[in-house]
Image (cartoon, helix red, strand yellow):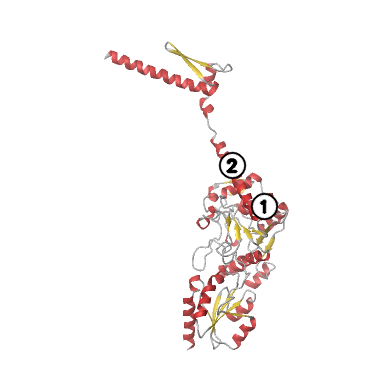
Amino acid sequence: RRSRRARESRKMAMRAVVCLALVAGSAAFSVGGPATLAARGSSMKLRTTSARAAPVVARRSAPMALNMAFDMEAAIKESKDARLKFLEDQSMAALKIAAENHENVVFPNAMIAGDCVITDLLGRLGYLKNGKAKIMVVDTFHLFPETMVFLDEMEKHYGFKAEVFQAEGCADKDVFDKKFGADLWKVDIEQYDKVCKVEPFQRGLKTLTTDLMINGRRRDHGAERAYIDLFENAPIGGGLAKSNPLAYWTFEDCFDYIAKYKIPIHPLHAQGYPSHGDAKDTIKVPEDGSVKFVNYKFEGKSEVWLDYAAERKGRFVGLQNKDGSVKTECGIHVAGAEKTFERDLWESGKVKKMARADAEALLAAPKDTLVVTYAPWCQFCQGMEEELTTFAAGMSGVEVAAYRGDEDREFVQDKFQAKAFPTISFVSKDGKVTVMDAGSPEKRSVKSFTEFVNAQQLVAK
């Protein structure tokens, strides 16, 4: 029993010696280089191969944890810098391809964070000063007062002059209020979007003869943009080729770029707004303004702004579409919104196109007629073109006509009760004008047109 205990004691002693040797060896390696261990009896001595090595006592006094530490923060910064450099190069290459392969490149600029990044990239490439890329701005007359002031600052900084478009026929907010009413956005948000955003946007693209549009959409904006790429071909049936130079960026990447180059950014970021649009429906996030981007640094919990799909949390607040759904887009970036009115609607088929004289003649000598008051730039009018064409082809006893109302608003409001586009009215043979409830796309169908006309004829009988 004693011999067994003695053997176990010797084993434990040997293990302790080995562990001590390993620890001493690693410490010596970290300080002075490879070490040679020599055993003499029960003691062990450490010799280093470096002639300049400090004595053993000095080496062991160096904090091993400090010598062995890995600077994680430096590694993170290095990896982020490398990522940003790659994104910069990729985006600039995309912009070069766009500008060098198209005649009229236009960038609709809302001066949000991503748009400021694109503006700077275009400036670095020299495309703003040489006119290879034009900056287009839509002034809705409802923007924050700081926005147009900031545009002036950007123009001076980068040496360009933006092309500014507004509601048709409106030189300023006073004219707009007299023509459409100061509360149009409260009365009919879809009509407001058409008049203040979509129509000027499309008219701007047409005026500038755009053949490629640059925009700042990114995959991290949300599910509806999760699969966009750097480029999009022009869709069959109308529309523009697009370049999305920030497609693979995140919102955090945008602010990293802004901080890296100290570029001009909208002053509202320093007041607590992650994004901005119309002042009437844009709020701070969070509402107490505790998160800000001031002097190129975040104050507060930046993740509130930088989380996936969080950039536009403060946009379109309190707004609903006509179908009751929450509003998330202004109408400019929905499918087909970039179509310009190079062609008119209903250029063929049995839908009769009416001029002012035709409309006046109909009202003077009324007959059963379905009249659609439309604007060719309106995506809802574009969306119902095929349905109305099909309806007219199969309808007998009732004429189907279309009147372009965006160029004659007062007349169509007075005669056809057209307060929005499209407005579908039935003029009966006794001169009565009845407006169809067609506020949603499913109501602008062959079936709905048929039911509406039949109901009006039944009433007349």
Q: Residue furthest left?
A: 1
The answer to whether residue 277 is visible is no
Q: Which residue is mark 1?
A: 122
Q: Which residue is mark 2?
A: 82
Q: Label 1: how many residues lie within 10 Å, few (<14), some (14-19) or many (20+)? A: many
- Left or right: where 339 falls relative to 444: right
- Left or right: where 176 falls relative to 395: right
Looking at the image, which is closer to me, 64 or 124? 124
Q: Position of residue 151 (x, y in %)?
A: 68, 56
The answer to whether residue 228 is visible is yes
Q: CA distance from mark 2 to mark 1?
A: 21 Å
Q: Position of residue 324 (x, y in %)?
A: 49, 66
Looking at the image, which is closer to me, 114 or 79? 79
At label 1, which amino acid type do we have?
Leu
Q: Position of residue 295 (x, y in %)?
A: 64, 46
Q: Label 2: how many residues lie within 10 Å, few (<14), some (14-19) or many (20+)? A: few
